[in-house]
Amino acid sequence: MDLRQLRYFLEMVEQGSLSQAARQLNVAQSALSFHLRNIEDELGTHLLVRQRSGVVATEAGEALARHARRLLDEHTRGLDEIRGMGREPVGTVRLGLPGTISDKLTVELIKTARTRFPKIRLTVSEAMSGFVAGWLRDEQIDLAILYIDPKEPDLRAQCLIDEELVVISAGGKGGTGCTSFTALQDNKLILPSPAHGLRQMLVAAAGRAGHVIRAEIEIDSYKNIKSLVGLGLGMSILPLHAVEAERMAGQLTIRRFQEPGLWRSLHLVHRTTRPPTRAVQAIAALIDEMIMTIVANGDWPGARPTSSTRAGGV
């Protein structure tokens, strides 16, 4: 089995169709069928099951697809690194991040990266922190921006900034002054679901204060949470930057938590199982630089440089 066969097989799995894979690879469908039979004969097991809608990987096929993806990625990374030695960074960098910070970073990051590092191809994927961390563990991405520190031996996290969380209520209905988890016990809360990184952080913070946090409504969308709060259906706890526009417009009222406040940290994470390429290092440094600039310019309300050490990097 060679790299070409692995590439063909992975395309069949990802397309879910031999005909679609053949078009993407610009090869005859009969050639793909031939390679598939050879691979299955070599491994002694079925890898794909034909269905009316296309093909689906068996358990063995899914295992081979994961293996093929890692091998092909490593092959590409190795060639890119060798070609880029002594010259500007070259290669593909795959970044995953939560959608909640995408509006602040993604467009400018891509634009700046294209100017500074024209030979780097940057791809960006968005999801909740838990899903992004899973992509990093499965080596589907090279870098992750997370609101959680995975604290795993194979992952290294660099803390970038701390971000303040505030209690929000409908405009004019939230009272004044600071608040606490104790004061929130009798209020209806609208929060993300338990799978969401913010909800997990709030549960942990409330537990440390000796309280259990419960949600009246669960929804994994900041936009919809703000809409429901604005209708007076409950209160919520969200990052200050996510509600600043509504606060300024008088649509939402905010209250901060009692000193020292409620904060969460933003981390830049990469795998330690292999050295990062020069392209990955370049994009990691650029992310750090851009986030620090956004915070210093006051364009990230409620954010501050982290109190943790900033030494190290990727």
Image (tube, grey):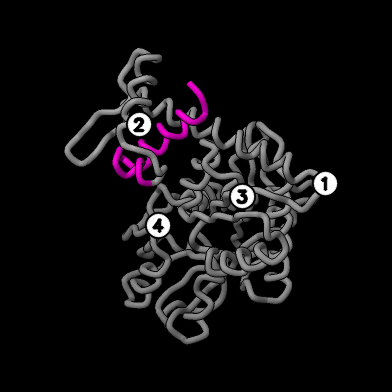
What's the residue at 29%, 41% (across, down)? 19
What's the residue at 37%, 19% (across, down)? 38
The x and y percentages for residue 23 are 35, 46
Q: Is residue 301 left or right of residue 250?
A: right
Please give the label number shown on residue 93.
Answer: 3
What's the residue at 73%, 53% (across, down)? 282
Q: Nearer the viewer, mark 4 or mark 3?
A: 3
Please give the label number shown on residue 86.
Answer: 1
The x and y percentages for residue 134 are 49, 41
Q: Nearer the viewer, mark 1 or mark 4?
A: 1
Helix, strand or loop under label 4: loop
* Residue position marked by numbered label 4 in the rendering: 192
Helix, strand or loop under label 3: strand
Along the polypeptide, which appears first: circle 4 or circle 3?
Answer: 3
Helix, strand or loop under label 1: loop
Please give the label number shown on residue 260.
Answer: none
As measured in the structure, the alpha-carbon distance from the residue carrying label 1 to the one carrying label 4 is: 47 Å
Out of 22 and 77, give the one closest to the viewer.
22
